[in-house]
Image (cartoon, rainbow, N blue to C red):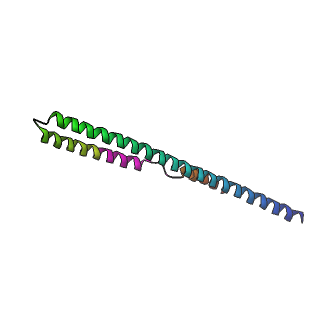
Amino acid sequence: MTASIRLSESLKRVAGTMFSIAQTRLELLANELEEERLHFEQTLLYSGIALFFFGLSIMLLTVFIVVAFWDSQRLLVLGSLAALFFIAGLLVWNASRNLIRKTPKLFSTSLAELSSDRNQLVP
């Protein structure tokens, strides 16, 4: 009878350990998700404010340049500035695509820890 009692106690400890590992990994996953959400919100806020001020400065600079060349080459200046802004927009769009492609995989830390746990449990 004592062997079966020791076996059941051992199984209970193993089950408790497994539940503890699962709980720890879920907490890590929740922390990573919250961290990603906060990072995304902060990035979105700062990007929006920066875009507003950049847009305002570009508009004012465009008006300034057009007024400076109003009598001589206003159409050429407007066309050149439109082409310049279009090219700049394409470059920024391409840079943002590259940035999105290089973002780390979501929950990479949690997945690495789960893989480590699996490797330790499997002989």
Q: Indicate whether residue 37 is drawn in magenta.
A: no
Residue visible at 38% across and 41% down? Answer: 50
Q: Is residue 52 above or below residue 19?
A: above
Question: Percent from the top left, x then y, of residue 65?
Answer: 20, 35
Residue visible at 54% across and 51% down? Answer: 108
Question: Percent from the top left, x then y, of residue 98?
Answer: 37, 47
Foreground residue, 34 or 115? Answer: 34
Foreground residue, 17 or 96? Answer: 96
Q: Name the quadrant containing residue 14.
A: bottom right
Asked whether, in this view, residue 24 is left or right of residue 92, the answer is right
Q: Farthest left residue?
A: 72
Question: Percent from the top left, x then y, of residue 105?
Answer: 49, 51
Q: Is residue 97 above or below residue 66?
A: below
Residue visible at 32% across and 47% down? Answer: 94
Q: Name the quadrant containing residue 119.
A: bottom right
Asked whether, in this view, residue 95 is left or right of residue 115, the answer is left
Question: Percent from the top left, x then y, of residue 15?
Answer: 74, 60
Residue visible at 50% across and 46% down? Answer: 39
**Which quadrant is the C terminus positioned in?**
bottom right
Asked whether, in this view, residue 18 is left or right of residue 101, the answer is right
Q: Name the quadrant containing residue 3.
A: bottom right
* Magenta residues, dominant SS class: helix
Asked whether the viewer can see residue 107, the reply is: yes
Q: In the rendered structure, which segment of residues is drawn in magenta?
A: 90-105
Q: Indicate whether residue 95 is drawn in magenta.
A: yes
**Which quadrant is the N terminus positioned in?**
bottom right
Q: Is residue 54 above or below residue 112?
A: above
Q: Farthest top residue?
A: 68
What is the total number of numbered labels drawn onto the structure image?
A: 0
Asked whether the viewer can see residue 123, the reply is: no
